[in-house]
Image (cartoon, helix red, strand yellow):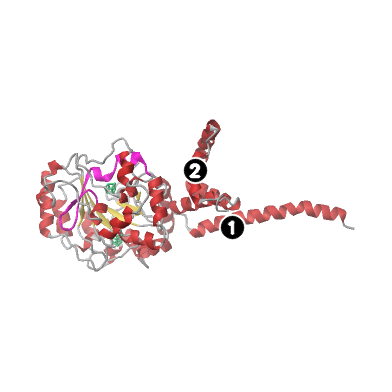
Amino acid sequence: MNFREQLETLADIKHSFVEKLSETESKTLRTSKLEILQLNITRKCNLQCKHCHVSAGPDRQELMSKAKFESILELLDKADISTLDITGGAPEMNPHLEWFIRSASGKVERIIVRSNLVILKEEEFKKYIKIYSENKIEIVASLPHFTENLTDRMRGSGIFSTSIEVIKELNTEGYGKNGTGKVLNFVHNPVGAILPGDQNALETEFKKRLMDLYGIHFNNLFCITNMPLGRYLEYLKKSDNYEDYMDELICSFNPAAAESLMCKNTLNVSWDGKLYNCDFNQMLELEADFEKFSNITDFDPSYFEDKMISVGNHCFGCTAGSGSSCQGTIE
Amino acid sequence: MSDYFEKKDLVDFANIGEYAEEEGGKFFEYYGKSMSEGKLSKREKCLIALTIAVVQKCPYCIDAYTNESLKLGITKEEMMEAIHVGASMQAGIVLAHSTQMRKIIKKKEM
Ligand code: SF4
Ligand code: SF4
């Protein structure tokens, strides 16, 4: 589905997000202080997971250029941004990643890389285990479930066992262990047309199972709702779950979660430098409304605050239940 | 039958306190407390609830607790294992009640 088809599909639900939002105290969503810069530096990926909202895969060619990365480094010098959140596709597949990490570290308090883990087993990319470790990169790794069967159903055959091997290597580097300062967090996305359950309960179970069976350490589990976008939206439609899933998202609308959405303090930048309020909007080409600024090359960070956030019906994915963000449950 | 058990009626569960607000409120307080994490984990409680839902054949509770189990990462094999506990308990309860029957038989037969 291209972005227009996705928007058309998303228009076909019982209540609009804008309408629901207008019933809350704040009525609309506006940006607050810019704290997080999130970069989708490629749409290329070695995997093709069924839940991928980016519809990433080996055939995608989109890569952020060195010139765009240089603009970002300039922005980091100008703006008081605490966190750099690097995602993709598989970020490691952008050839400038190593240089960029080394150049950016020291400019922000925290650099996160969202890795699919298995890429760190490939000859060309395994150097990143050391690079991440040396630069104290916080790794956020996708691990939908603690069983091989469910993880492989979502991400492809053999992915779970390779992920476990890579996690063990990361643990040997000190990742996921208290006191090392090397943070390894996992992301759980439900495998199927369901919303995530209680984050604490799931984290307890993940920790117990992964320790008992594989002796694995990690820091936190983030439970992230699958957004009705990209490949996941296609799955919902094909499996005849779209209507029920959207109904559940709408029924679970939580005004408190709407107060602390990640789009309030995040600027998302696509591979070509375009500006978005979040990477979900990026997939729908719903650009952020910063009037005269539309690309990172000329963006003035002092302009970020108190601007209207572009929203759509996919936003129900962030406001359901306890809420969902790139850092897991909101509340 | 479809008029009696409609999927959309599940959301009406939130309104079962209607016409008797105080009792309803107390029920929800009790329900919330008993289902929350205690000495038993949320997972364990969810599997107990799912098993009772199936044993009692309540379509609403089966829907609610199958979904809740999936959300908590409980696998289908674990769910089915729990259902077998319920099924064998049911079978055992039926067979245990045959004691009454057997006692009568033994008393009456020559
Ligand atoms: S979900 Fe992540 S690992 Fe999977 S295809 Fe998408 S970008 Fe790649
Ligand atoms: S999808 Fe979520 S993060 Fe993005 S604009 Fe909507 S509510 Fe905000």
Element class at badge 1: helix
- Was residue B46 drawn as part of the magenta stretch in this picture? no
The answer to whether dots 2 and 1 both sit on one chain is yes
Element class at badge 2: helix
Left or right: residue A88 versus residue B80 is left
Range of magenta residues: A253-278
Q: Nearer the viewer, residue A90 or A111?
A: A90
Image quadrant occupied by the C terminus of chain A: top left
The Cα atoms of the two marked residues, 2 and 1, are separated by 30 Å
Identify which residue is drawn at 27% across, 45% down. A262
Q: Is residue A138 visible?
A: no
Give the residue at mark 1: B84
Image quadrant occupied by the N terminus of chain A: bottom left
Left or right: residue A272 versus residue A142 is left
Q: Position of residue A180 (x, y in %)?
A: 28, 49
- Was residue A275 drawn as part of the magenta stretch in this picture? yes
Q: Residues within 10 Å of mark 2 (few under 14, many from 20)?
A: few
Give the residue at mark 2: B12
Q: Nearer the viewer, residue A43 or B10?
A: B10
Q: Position of residue A38 (x, y in %)?
A: 21, 51
Q: How many marks?
A: 2
Three-letter amino acid code at the position of disc 1:
His
